[in-house]
Each structure stands twice: as structure tokens, then as C-alpha cells.
Image: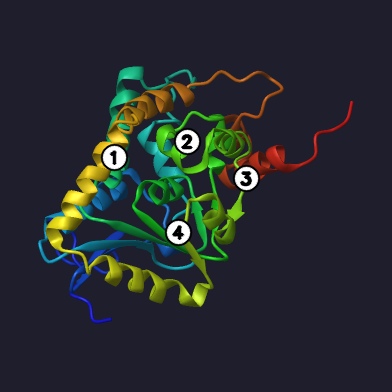
Amino acid sequence: MTETPTRTTGGTPMHDDPVLLEKHGPIARLILNRPAKGNALTFADAELLTDLLHEAEDDDDVKVIILQGRGRSFCVGHDYDDVVKVYQLDKKDANGRHVRLSQRARLQIDRRLAEGYMAFQYAMKPVIAQVQGNCVGFGIYLAELVDLVVCADTARFSHAEQRLGFAGNTWHLNTLLLQYGPKKVREMMLFGSEFDGIEAARIGLANISVPEEDLEPTAEEWALRVARNPKDALITGKAIHQMALDSLGATQQFTRGYVGHTLGTNLSFEKDEFNFFRERRDAGTKQAYRNRDAWFTEPTPSN
């Protein structure tokens, strides 16, 4: 496919930017471009992604948008080093005691995140997620909020972020309930278990799951099929779809989501409960993730 030069909003085109926008005919591609990090995005990267989404929406030549990740994975979530920095999780006072951000400061940060998620649910034009490899946290949120998902059979989806101490406190619960049903949602939120692309199609997250070598051609084919619709029809059809979602509380979920996220990341843990943040302090980030997953997957010791 011949592509227009890579661009970013308000800046000089750079092929090493964390998010890229490429256009060809009626199709725009939003590309997460941190392959060495599994396309984990910083907060600034997420805002750039939203800006480029709006740029594609404003381009009258674009009829459909493909969202994809460069490299082995679609998106493994937020860059945790950046999370620590933005939320000042390592900040200490003169006596070496941890200092938490105020609730009002946290709410402002989380509200901006919620607005970014909303931008994808309320995009004016159809968005297709093209998913391979890991699709976790921020990555699976995007997949759940866009119009269509084409994934590889070998893709690995999960709400593993719930294992940090959320257990169902998430950004877009209404969307999850509609996609999966209440019982399945509770299972996904309480366990944070991983499932593949074939299972994603079975439970309603993906529209189609294909062998990995067929992923990009299939996403391209689906985008071209969408683009056969008239421009006005695509915009009005999406608007009516969004109005129907709103009648089911789709906008309210994001307000509940950002307030819930602020509360959920200020938990008190009992001594015998898994505390990711304490584990990270004592053992480092990578080992803390390993310990977290072991806590949730290893058999419970018998009394």
C-alpha cells in the first residue's frame, strides 16, 4: 500500500514518533509506534493518539480509520514508568515518607484519561482495531471501545490491570456489560485471565479472528468494505449508534470510571493481601508483575 508521509499534529513528520498517522485514499491508519516497549504508551503519547484521531476525523478524504500497533504487540497498556512519574508514586518528603497526590490532583489526571477513552467511543468515523500479540490494559480498552476488531488467532487479550487491586473498578463498565454480559464481566474483572483471538471472537470482543499472516490484509479488506458507504451515511450512522449507547448510560460510565480509578488506586491493603506497589518497592517492577500473576494463577494452598 502506498502511504502519504507520516505526520503528527502540529509538528514535523518523524517516523520514530510514538504515534503515527498515515493516509491512503479513504483509509487512515493510526499506528502505535513503540514496538520495543510493546507499544506501551505514556500519558503524553495517549494525548497525541487522541489528537491524531481528531485529525483523521477532520480530514474529509478519510472514511474509515484502522488502529494498529507496530511490532509484535498491539498494546501492552500504559508505560508503568510514566505512570509512576505522573502520579508521583515515588515522591517522598524530607523524612523519607511517601507523599500522595491530593485527590483533586488525581481526579484531574484521571479525567483527562477518561476524555481520551471517550474520544474513541465517540469518534465521528468508524474505527477498526487490528490486533496482534498482547492487548492488555489501555490496549484492550481501545479494542472494546472502537467499532470493529479484527485480530490474530494468536493475539493475547486480558484485563490483567485488574490484578493491581481493582477487581471490577474500571473505566467503561457499561460497554463491558453490553459486550460480554454481567457474569462474564465479573469473571474477567476478578481473575484478569488471558484469552486468545479465537476466544475473543467467540465472546464478542472481536468481529473476526484470522491466522496472523492474514491479519493486515483482512483489516484492509474490512476497511475498504466500510468505505463503500457514503460519507454522510457513515457519519450519521455513527452518530445514531452513539445516541443509542447514550440511552444506555455510555457517557456516564466515563465519569464513573475516572472517579473510580482515583479511588481504586488509593486502596488500603491488609498485611496478607497482595500489594503490587509494595512488591514493586521491594523487588522492582518486573518481579512485581511476575509475583502479581503468580498470586492470581497459582493454586491456593490448602489449610
Q: Earlier in the sequence, mark 3 or mark 2?
A: 2
**Percent position (x, y) of residue 243?**
24, 37
Viewer-nearest of discs 4 and 1: 4
Identified by mark 4, the residue type is Asn
Give the mark nearer the N terminus: 4 vs 1.
1
Q: In this view, does 44 lie to the left or right of 77?
A: left
Return the mark for residue 177: 2
| SS category of the residue bearing label 3 | loop
Q: Is residue 222 left or right of residue 28?
A: right
Q: Which amino acid does label 1 sit on?
A: Met
Marking on residue 207: 4
Amino acid on which the number 2 mark rests in the picture: Leu
Instruction: Please name the residue that numbered disc 1 is placed on.
Output: 118
Q: In this view, does 195 lie to the left or right of 263?
A: right
Quadrant of the drawing holding the N terminus: bottom left
Residue shown at 44%/24% (left/top)? 92
Q: Are marks 4 and 1 in contact (CB under 8 Å)?
A: no
Q: Is mark 1 on a helix, strand or loop?
A: helix
Which of the marked residues, 4 or 3, is nearer the chain's N terminus?
3
Which of the two discs, 3 and 2, sits closer to the camera? 2
Name the front one of labels 2 and 1: 2
Q: In the displayed structure, would residue 153 be above or below residue 192?
A: below
Q: On the image, numbered disc 3 is attached to which residue?
A: 193
Q: Is residue 171 above or below residue 214?
A: above
Local crowd at mark 1 within 10 Å, few (<14), some, or many (≥20)?
many
Contact (Cβ within 8 Å) of mark 2 with mark 4 = no
Whichever of labels 2 and 4 marks the residue nearer the N terminus, that label is 2
Horizontal and vertical percent position of residue 255: 32, 26
Which x, y percent locates residue 171?
40, 34
Report the number of discs.
4
